[in-house]
Amino acid sequence: MKQIFLVEDDGVIAKNLSLLLRSEGFAVTCAFTKSEAVSCLLDKRFDLALVDISLPDGNGFAVCTEIKAWQDIPVLFLTASQDEASVVTGLTMGADDYITKPFRPRELIARIRAALRKSGKAPTVFKIGALCVDTASGIVKKNGNEVFLSALEYRLLLVFVGAPKSVITRDRLLNEVWDASGEFVTNNALTVYIKRLREKIEDDPTKPQIILTVRGMGYRLGREAENYASE
């Protein structure tokens, strides 16, 4: 499980961000001040830091400097400022990216995963029961044998792999498929794609154990995901 270091002085924002990140399978440690952040850096190792620029006892730039001095991890700035100079300063000091508040949750998660991949800290091989998904090569195997998926089927599988503990709504799946294919996909078509994917990855598609239906909500990874692991 990837460790996210959140430095944010607004308690409400920190709570909501922590809930979002944990729902996406991340572990979160939160600090509310510069001094707390420095103490955390001495006690724990992290994979990525989200840092607010405005803090009560300093600023995010100083925290970024401390992080880079102690740990070689990506730093993403969270800022309400539209000031170009602040953005340039942050990037010059070693920040890997910045996100302007307010931001969309999906955009934040996508930026985090991109930064982790770029730093080499994101897992590229996922195992769900007998299913193995190698996101670096795009190869999917079941019981050691390659499973051939269409582009849309593979994209759907990646959505579930990317959020192993979350219920994925049909609306989100439709958005993800639209982003990947560039063509309009209906609700009925989504049902067909889910069926086809199950036929390829499940032992018994009529009794799915990997992609389960959550009535009235969407889908989620099932009990097989208890063996979820990364390399």
Image (cartoon, grey):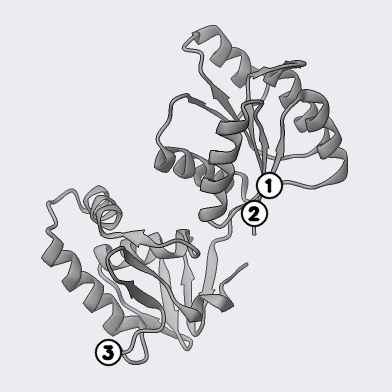
Indicate whether 109 appears above or below 83. below
CA gap between label 3 and label 2 equals 34 Å
SS of the residue under disc 2: loop
Residue 214 in the figure: left or right of residue 53:
left
Q: Residue at x 28, y 76 (%)?
A: 197
- 31 relative to 191, above or below: above
**Image: 68 above or below 229:** above
Q: CA distance from mark 3 to mark 1?
A: 39 Å
Mark 3: few, some, or many residues within 10 Å (few <14, many ≥20)?
Answer: few
Q: Are marks 1 and 2 in contact (CB under 8 Å)?
A: yes
Query: Label 1 belongs to which residue?
Result: 47
Residue at the image point whose x is 27% and y is 65% from the top: 216
Quadrant containing the C terminus in the rendered view: bottom right
Which residue in the rendered view is the most extreme toward the bottom? 204
What kind of residue is marked 2?
Lys
- Residue name at image x 76 percent, y 31 percent: 68
For marks 3 and 1, the one nearer the N-term is: 1
Instruction: Tell which tag, 3 or 1, sits nearer the viewer.
Output: 3
Q: Amino acid at mark 1?
A: Asp
Give the amino acid type for the residue marked by disc 3 in the picture: Thr
Q: Tell me the residue that label 2 is attached to.
A: 2
* Of pointers 1 and 2, the one earlier in the residue sequence: 2
Instruction: Say which residue label 3 marks.
Output: 206
Q: Position of residue 75 (x, y in %)?
A: 64, 33
Residue occupying image coordinates x 58% and y 78%: 227
In the image, is 205 to the left or to the right of 104? left
